[in-house]
Each structure stands twice: as C-alpha cells, then as structure tokens.
Image (spheres, helix red, strand yellow):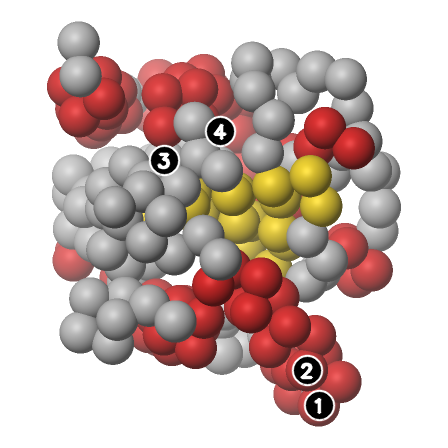
Amino acid sequence: MSLDVDLYGIHQEIDACTVCKSAVAGFKKPKPLDRGTAGPIMIIGQEPGKSELTSGRAFAGQSGKRLDEWLVAAGAARRHPRAGIYFTSVLKCPCPSSRYFRVMARNCSGFLRRQIETVKPDLIITLGKEAFELFNFRRDQFETAQCNPYYTRNEVLLTGYGFHFWILHLPHPSGANRWHNDQANRRRLDGALRFVTGFLGKGE
C-alpha cells in the first residue's frame, strides 16, 4: 500500500476512536482534521484546541498563525507555509482537564507511534512541554532543551521507531507563553528556525 493509503487508514481510525469517552468527563471529538502531507518534517503538538474543534485544521487559531509565521521565517512559501509538512499531536482529541491528560496520552500512543513509523520523518519538531517529554532521549530539562536540535543516533542505539531522526524541541507557539517575551529566547528561536530551513522542500 502507498504512504497516503496507510495514513488515510490511520486517520480514519483516529476519527472514529471513542475509547476515552467512558473515562473522560466532557470528552469531545474534533472534526476530522487536515493534517497536511507526509514529508521530511513532522510537527507534534499537545492536543487539538477549541479552534481545531470547529475548523477541521490541525494547529488552527492564534497558535497556528504563529506557527505559520515560524515556518515562513524558516524559508517556507508564505502562501503555503505548511506544504510538505505533516502535523499531529500527542492527544488526538481535546483534553477537558489536565487530570485526564495521562490516560488520554496512553490511549492515543499507538496512533502516534504508527504515524511516526509510517511517515518516517527526517526531522520531528515538538511544540511545548508535553510533546517534548515523549522524545526526551537526553533526559534534559525542557527549559534547556528548547531550540537545540540533535540527532537520535548520537544519543541512543535504538529509538523504538525503527529509524533515526533529528529532533527539535520548540516552545509552544501560544500567545500566552511568556517565553517569547525574552529577547535572548527569540534569538535562540531564530537559530532553531534556520536549522529547519535545511529540511524544507527536501521531499519534493
């Protein structure tokens, strides 16, 4: 089967899954999301938010707008900054309360693993602390790991996904994230985005 067919099957399973419904009060399914296209870059966030519930687009709202600005700064086309990039998240549905995050993450973990194994990205970008913790091969602190790319082959013999890849942990693009208010942090982000440039358009 082709890559697109494999991903389509995974997406159908995600969109139909209601495993968390009985255990998570206030559980809601988002609309089927446009997750972009498989390519050399995969971006992994925390979970769909309120904007995603109604828009049908991964990384919508203000956070999505800032993410698009980052991609343009890295060299992506302004009109189509997401071209050739695959988007997903740790949770496939919004988490109504932080106390449910761990159980929902466990329930979704198989989907995320299959997405990674199917796409086989050269670069995985995580957004925010929750996504960072799943890929913290170095056992770093989030604050020091942000914006510092590394290659998994240099850290571990096996990744658990069957292949090695670059990892780049970025801060969450939310406007409420005060990390962005610091000028030194913005310089670190600029450097990280220059690293992303080398992967844009690689799969074309």
Q: Nearer the viewer, mark 3 or mark 2?
A: 2
71 lies above or below 154: below
Q: Amino acid at mark 3?
A: Lys
Residue 104 is labelled as: 4
Q: Residue 166 at x, y = what percent?
A: 61, 41
Whole-number angstrom distance, CA of label 3 to CA of label 2: 32 Å
Residue 165, by quadrant, is top right
First in residue order: circle 1 vs circle 3: 3
Q: At x 65% / y 87%, what residue is drawn?
A: 181
Which residue occupies the foreground of this view, 81 or 110?
A: 81
Residue 183 is labelled as: 1
Q: Nearer the viewer, mark 4 or mark 1?
A: 1
Can residue 137 be seen here? The reply is yes
Secondary structure beneath dot 2 equals helix
Q: Nearer the viewer, mark 1 or mark 3?
A: 1
Q: Amino acid at mark 1?
A: Gln
Q: Residue 180 at x, y = what percent?
A: 62, 81
Dot 3 corresponds to which residue?
A: 92
Q: At x 82% / y 60%, what residue is drawn?
A: 144
Residue 187 is labelled as: 2
Q: Residue 150 at x, y = what percent?
A: 71, 46
Q: Nearer the viewer, mark 2 or mark 4?
A: 2
155 lies above or below 111: below
Give the class, few, some or many, for how many residues have Cα within 10 Å of label 3's Cα (few <14, many ≥20): many
Q: Residue 117 at x, y = what percent?
A: 43, 19
Whole-number angstrom distance, CA of label 1 to CA of label 3: 33 Å
